[in-house]
């Protein structure tokens, strides 16, 4: 990998910054100046796509020592919290994500972390611990796209023949923040715009709503769909898997979407019956990809039953080899959003430029869901889950709730060689995002005009935070670490050391000024009305009546003001001082978004559940 990187020809920092200045009078963009010249554009691998694609985002991870704690980097945030999702056995630490030797290094290791947990049966807190520490980095509410090409170059972690690790490269709709369960309930992974009376309770932002709240469009369902470029299952290839020619280790590529198919669902480990699963789906010949019969989706159970809903996973597998764990390989998705009416569009996955899998708009006709039109952000992580690569079903006589290495009572419930597989490292060489030139469906921004998210997130901040936080994301730092010389601040071109503290130059951010700045050049952004009010639908007759009342009130005010001015001419003069009218405007203060009543948001006769977020988990009160 190192030899290949030395052969790259990179544009000078001056040239890249100069081009940005000429285009938009800004001193930076989301494109990393370390990106090679031949990567500034790309040709689509979808043969029917003849458009020109330009680079809109990149991170080459060339600067060693970059950290991604909350507030350190404009592109990414490394989580520091427990993960409650997917039977997780790990704790995410920001210390496990750093740049070294020109790559982003995500480390998973055996390390104990205690955390406050909540028992849903007893409704009490208790102290629990996780025995594995790992890393997740995500671009939530920082950089998002709608449509385009996303490409990762990565080397996978650990031994390909040892189960237990769950590395992932993926995308998620910005309305949900990964691992923050309160933000994803009734939102993930919906991509459904229609009004379905039977499903309106389970989709929080649904097409049945005729009133716009939080700047959202009335009559349009919203959600947070998921595109998985890569999830890999390691394990013993001698253990043959049923009903597929793909064996471990393998890669899964998936589109996770709701609503799902409710009846005649396929059984895990078996192929779907003809006519009861999504079609058409495309599988690559060269990659020898095949339908994934081991994951068809998740039933999200809520009370009452009307709030329960089904999500589906349109997923394909392809076999991997040891090379994917020793060398860099390319993982790519080409995503074309649907038309305004929700029809059309596609998602296609490629590995080392070879087609693996394809899902089309027409594939989703049986449920009415759509190819995503939501702004989506990028994620990279290594998870550990008892439902991923661990013995299943649980061996007879085994507890399967003990996962401690070195404890003989736990040995039967963990994969062979699992404890020797730590530490393990996923190395990401680069992340690059392209969009078609002059394509209106390809959008940059986490809160675009057609699919805004900002006001909704601002109105539900607690869902996107953990206990003790005041805001979901900290402002990006521009220096602040202790230093003795400019060398400790990235060098004189990146930062300077003044008073023993780093201060960054304009193009750089982070405590030690090692991170390139980043922001939108062509952001599609929702314009938020003054005072945070959003437009809502009102019947024309009501608009006319309200307009008449307001007009009459304004005329009355004008009459009163003129009359008082005339009276002022005849005020008495006392002791040489003119009497003044001191009437103020008390009582006419504008209401704010924060104190506006929300009673109108509750539909009549609907059951209302009260929730509280405890350590970022949604709990029924």
Image: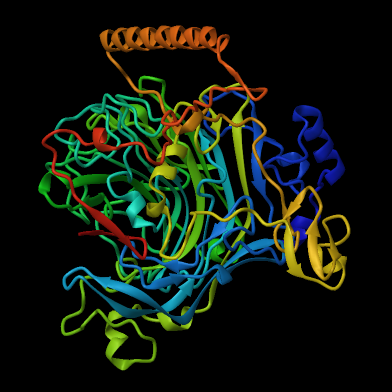
Q: How is the image coloured?
A: rainbow
Is 453 left or right of 6, judged from the image as shown?
left
Q: State the image coordinates of residue 467 (x, y, percent, origin top left).
A: 41, 65
Horizontal and vertical percent position of residue 136: 50, 62
**Left or right of 15 in this view: 541:** left
Q: Nearer the viewer, residue 563 or 481?
A: 563
Q: Is residue 141 above or below residue 524?
A: below
Q: Nearer the viewer, residue 326 or 205?
A: 205
In the rendered image, which quarter is residue 593 located in? top left
Q: Which of the 4 quarters of the picture holds residue 280?
A: top left
Residue plotted at (26% across, 45% down): 311
Quadrant of the image for the N terminus? bottom right
Q: Position of residue 273 (x, y in %)?
A: 16, 41
The residue sitting at the front extreme is 575
**Total number of numbered discs in the rendering:** 0
Q: Quadrant of residue 591?
A: top left
Q: Please, is residue 52 above or below residue 407 in the view?
A: above
Residue 619 position (above or below residue 432) = below
Instruction: Give the side of residue 406 with respect to residue 488, left or right.
Output: left
Give the x, y percent position of residue 544: 31, 7
Seen in the picture, residue 370 relative to 484 is either above or below; the reply is above
Residue drawn at point x = 82 percent, y = 71 percent: 500
Instruction: Report whether residue 17 is seen.
Output: yes
Q: Is residue 347 left or right of residue 188?
A: right
The answer to whether residue 12 is seen in the rendering is no
């Amino acid at each position: 990998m190192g030899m290949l990187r030395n052969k790259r020809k990179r544009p000078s920092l001056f040239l890249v910054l100069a081009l940005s200045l000429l285009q938009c009078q800004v001193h930076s963009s989301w494109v990393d100046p370390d990106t090679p010249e031949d990567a500034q554009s790309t040709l689509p691998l979808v043969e029917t796509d003849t458009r020109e694609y330009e680079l809109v985002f990149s991170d080459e991870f060339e600067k060693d020592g970059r950290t991604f704690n909350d507030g350190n980097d404009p592109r990414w945030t490394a989580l520091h919290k427990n993960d409650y999702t997917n039977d997780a056995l790990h704790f995410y630490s920001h210390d496990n994500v750093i740049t070294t030797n020109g790559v982003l290094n995500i480390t998973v290791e055996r390390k104990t972390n205690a955390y406050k947990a909540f028992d849903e049966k007893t409704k009490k807190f208790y102290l629990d611990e996780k025995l594995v520490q790992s890393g997740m980095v995500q671009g939530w509410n920082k950089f998002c796209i709608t449509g385009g090409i996303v490409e990762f170059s990565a080397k996978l972690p650990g031994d390909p023949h040892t189960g237990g690790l769950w590395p992932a490269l993926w995308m998620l709709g910005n309305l949900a923040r990964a691992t923050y369960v309160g933000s994803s309930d009734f939102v993930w992974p919906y991509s459904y715009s229609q009004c379905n009376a039977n499903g309106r309770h389970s989709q929080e932002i649904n097409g049945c709503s005729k009133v716009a709240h939080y700047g959202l469009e009335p009559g349009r369902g919203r959600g947070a769909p998921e595109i998985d470029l890569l999830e890999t299952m390691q394990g013993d290839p001698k253990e043959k898997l049923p009903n597929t020619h793909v064996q471990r280790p393998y890669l899964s590529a998936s589109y996770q979407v709701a609503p799902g198919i409710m009846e005649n669902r396929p059984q895990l480990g078996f192929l779907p019956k003809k006519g009861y699963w999504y079609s058409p789906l495309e599988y690559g010949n060269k990659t020898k990809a095949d339908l994934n019969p081991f994951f068809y989706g998740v039933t999200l159970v809520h009370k009452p039953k009307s709030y329960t809903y089904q999500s589906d996973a349109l997923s394909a597998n392809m076999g991997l080899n040891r090379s994917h764990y020793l060398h860099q390989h390319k993982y790519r998705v080409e995503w074309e959003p649907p038309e305004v009416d929700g029809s059309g569009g596609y998602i296609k996955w490629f590995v080392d430029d070879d087609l693996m899998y394809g899902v089309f708009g027409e594939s989703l006709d049986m449920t009415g869901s759509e190819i995503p039109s939501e702004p989506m952000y990028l994620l990279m992580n290594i998870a550990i889950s008892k439902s991923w690569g661990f013995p299943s079903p649980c061996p007879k006589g085994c507890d399967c709730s003990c996962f401690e290495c070195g404890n003989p009572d736990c040995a039967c419930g963990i994969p062979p060689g699992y404890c020797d597989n730590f530490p393990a490292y996923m190395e990401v060489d680069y992340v690059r995002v392209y969009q078609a030139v002059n394509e209106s469906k390809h959008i940059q921004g986490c809160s675009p005009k057609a699919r805004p998210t900002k006001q909704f997130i601002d109105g539900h901040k607690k869902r996107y935070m953990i206990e003790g936080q005041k805001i979901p994301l900290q402002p990006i730092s521009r220096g602040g670490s202790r230093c003795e010389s400019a060398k400790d601040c990235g060098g004189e071109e990146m930062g300077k050391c003044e008073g023993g503290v780093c201060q960054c130059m304009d193009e750089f951010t982070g405590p030690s000024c090692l991170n390139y700045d980043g922001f939108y050049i062509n952001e599609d952004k929702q314009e938020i009305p003054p005072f945070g009010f959003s437009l809502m639908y009102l019947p024309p007759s009501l608009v006319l009546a309200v307009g008449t009342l307001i007009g009459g009130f304004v005329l009355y005010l004008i009459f009163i003001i003129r009359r008082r001015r005339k009276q002022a001419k005849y005020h008495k003069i006392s002791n040489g001082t003119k009497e003044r009218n001191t009437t103020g405007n008390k009582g006419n203060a504008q209401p704010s978004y924060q104190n506006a009543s929300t009673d109108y948001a509750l539909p009549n006769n609907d059951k209302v559940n009260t929730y509280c977020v405890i350590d970022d988990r949604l709990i029924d009160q």
